[in-house]
């Protein structure tokens, strides 16, 4: 059976009980810190090794309890893993930029196709190409058919 010691601190603020419990595990050389109702109405736990239990950690605990900016629950990541994450983020950003550029290009091309195939464009080509004179075209719209168009 592991030898352990517990220490708890409780306070009540506006009817909400805040608590901090510290449990030392001598066999594993760890301290389990559990905080209830500090940031929200739930419990959070952090396990630290005995060598991490120092003045800096006490300062972080104090900052956490007084709701000052702190890094008590921030996990340290190995540098190689951070680089992998950074690279993945950069690749995702590049991918999004390319997708955005492609989408914009497709929108531009689609608008161009719509303009080129619109009724007005077709009529303009017919008139400009000389395949139909404007008067014959007007007559056709009116429902009159000229024998020469």
Image (spheres, grey):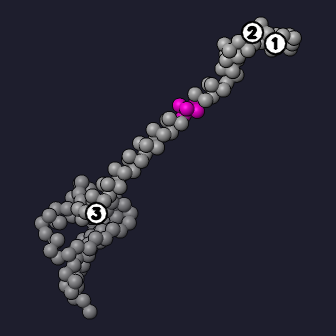
Instruction: Name the image quarter holding the N terminus.
Output: bottom left
Left or right: 137, with 125 as reference point:
right
3 and 1 marks in contact (CB < 8 Å)? no
Q: Earlier in the sequence, mark 2 or mark 1?
A: 2
Residue at 27%, 58% in the rendered image: 83
Residue at 63%, 25% in the rendered image: 116
Q: Nearer the viewer, residue 35 or 15?
A: 35
Q: Quadrant of residue 68?
A: bottom left
Q: Nearer the viewer, residue 36 or 130?
A: 130
**Camera-side mark, 3 or 2:** 2
Residue at 48%, 40% in the rendered image: 102
Residues at marks 2 and 1, CA–CA distance in whole angstroms: 8 Å
Residues at marks 3 and 2, CA–CA distance in whole angstroms: 72 Å
Label 1 SS: loop
Judge whether 112 appears above or below 101 on screen: above
Q: Which residues are magenta?
A: 107-111
Q: Earlier in the sequence, mark 3 or mark 2?
A: 3
Circle 1 residue: 149
| Residue 137 is inside the magenta segment | no
């Amino acid at each position: 059976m592991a030898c352990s010691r517990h220490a708890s601190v409780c306070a009540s603020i506006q009817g909400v009980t805040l608590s901090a419990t510290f449990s030392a595990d001598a066999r594993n050389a760890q301290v389990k810190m559990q905080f209830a109702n500090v940031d929200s109405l739930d419990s959070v736990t952090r396990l630290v090794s005995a060598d991490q239990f120092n003045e800096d950690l006490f300062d972080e605990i104090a900052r956490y309890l007084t709701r000052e900016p702190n890094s008590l629950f921030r996990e340290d990541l190995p540098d190689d893993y951070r680089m992998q994450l950074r690279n993945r983020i950069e690749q995702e950003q590049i991918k999004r930029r390319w997708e955005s550029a492609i989408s914009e290009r497709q929108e531009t091309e689609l608008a161009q196709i719509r303009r080129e195939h619109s009724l007005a464009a077709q009529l303009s080509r017919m008139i400009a190409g000389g395949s139909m004179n404007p008067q014959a075209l007007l007559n056709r719209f009116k429902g009159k058919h000229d024998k020469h168009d």
